[in-house]
Amino acid sequence: MNGKMDLVAAVNDEATLGRNLLASDMVARGCVNLHVLRDAVSASRAYNAALDATMGEIVIFAHQDVYFPPGWLHRLQGAIADVSARDPDWALIGPTGVSTDGRHLGRVWSSSQNACVGDPIAGPEPAQSFDELVIVMRRAAGLRFDPDLPGFHLYGADIVQTARARGLGAWIC
């Protein structure tokens, strides 16, 4: 990968953004290009606008209340390498979602539960849907979010199904 990755967030609460995403090590150290969109009418429209405004090979879409701990970016780079070895034309990676055989996979920190939830997985698993908290996109896959999808829900399932319909891989890892 050449250059920094882009990190995108649709934001409606500055305090939540400051406590979480902006406090993340990779953001505080400037390891990613941060692109914040405010007052968006939908996640899909915000994220498409971010795709138009950014240039990174990898785009990370994250909720404003996500905190990335130290080392997360390094782990993401490892996941990208693992997925690329299996599927050179992959489109999407998510840390948690539903596998193609219906299992809920992935382990993440839940700020609402103040605990880790889910089970770790041994390696990348094909996805049929993602939880929207974090979605990683390989720009070269050429995907766009459905601009007609209203609000801030179900765009994770929709983008994964769009990728799969185009023969592109979506992976939980």
Image (spheres, helix red, strand yellow):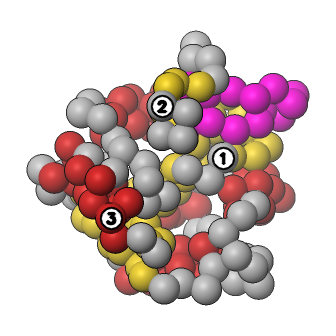
Give the labeled residue for mark 3. 15
Q: Secondary structure at mark 2?
A: loop
State the image coordinates of residue 109 (x, y, percent, origin top left).
48, 32
Q: Position of residue 149 (x, y in %)?
A: 76, 77
Q: Secondary structure at mark 1?
A: loop
Q: Position of residue 36 (x, y in %)?
A: 36, 74
Query: How far apart, in angstroms, are the residues tagged by discs 1 and 2?
Result: 18 Å
Q: In the figure, is residue 1 to the left or right of 13?
A: left
The reply to whether the magenta stretch includes residue 96 is yes
Callout 3 crowding tier (Cα within 10 Å): few <14, some 14–19, many ≥20: few
Q: Residue at x 62, y 17 (%)?
A: 119
Question: Mark 1 highlights which residue?
Answer: 131
Q: Residues within 10 Å of mark 2 (few under 14, many from 20)?
A: few
Residue at 72% from the left image edge and 64% from the top image edge: 153
* Circle 2 residue: 114
Mark 1 to mark 3 CA distance (whole Å): 23 Å
What residue sits 60% from the left and 73% below the top? 43
Q: Quadrant of residue 142?
A: bottom right
